Structures are given as structure tokens and as C-alpha cells.
Image: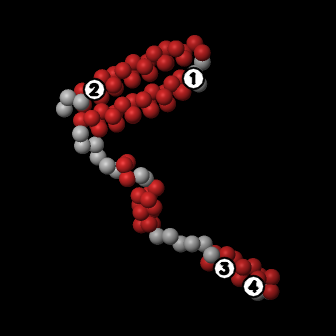
Amino acid sequence: MNSLDRLLATSTFCMLSLIPITPAYAAPAAADAIDPPRWTQEDTTPRQRYETAHKEAAAAQKDLLAECRTQPKAEQSACAREVHANYLQEMSEAKKLLSQ
């Protein structure tokens, strides 16, 4: 092995030794640190369940309307009507949560 090969081998070894090795079981702890505590709290009252369902329906409507806008102009209004009908159906189901 000449000096250039030794130098390359040594530098490669040094670079590899600098790579941090993290155990696979550390990932869930990191994910828990990222999520706010309110995301893991269960809805316990009918009002909380309704509010969560309302937020989810509104977010879904917003996302789907954005998708409608990417369709050809001729199809956008029909798409938006369908999205709105789905939203109304989801809100109807959400309102039922208040009486439980």
C-alpha cells in the first residue's frame, strides 16, 4: 500500500467515524417531542368532538377546493359543488356529535 492509498484509507476512516450513529428506538421519542401535547389529548366531551370534526371538515374542504382549481375550467364548478356537498354532509354528521 503506497502513501496515497494509506492517506485515502485514513481520511475515509476518519470521515466515517464522525457520522453519528443513532439507535432505531430513538425515533419515537423525537417524534413525541415534535407533536404538541394537544394532538395526543383525546376529545372527551361532545363539544370537543364536534369542534374537531368541524376543523377537519373545513380543512378537507379547503384542500379539495384547491385541487378543484387545478382542474380544467369546465370542471371546476362541478368539482366545487361536490366538495361543498361533502362538507355539508360532514357537518351534518358533526352536529350529531353534539347530542351524544
Residue 64 x, y percent position in the rendering: 48, 27
Please identify the quadrant where the C terminus is shown. Answer: top left
Residue 30 x, y percent position in the rendering: 45, 61
Disc 2/disc 1 C-alpha distance (Å): 29 Å
Write down the quadrant of residue 10 in the picture: bottom right
Q: Is residue 8 left or right of residue 71?
A: right
Is tag 1's residue or tag 4's residue first in the polypeptide sequence? 4
- Cβ atoms at labels 2 and 3 below 8 Å apart: no
| Residue located beneath label 2 in the image | 95
Q: Is residue 98 left or right of residue 56?
A: left
In the image, 2 versus 21, the foreground residue is 21
Disc 2/disc 4 C-alpha distance (Å): 73 Å
Foreground mark, 1 or 4? 1
In the image, 66 versus 52, the foreground residue is 52
Disc 2/disc 3 C-alpha distance (Å): 63 Å
Please identify the quadrant where the N terminus is shown. Answer: bottom right
Query: What amino acid type is highlighted by mark number 1?
Result: Arg
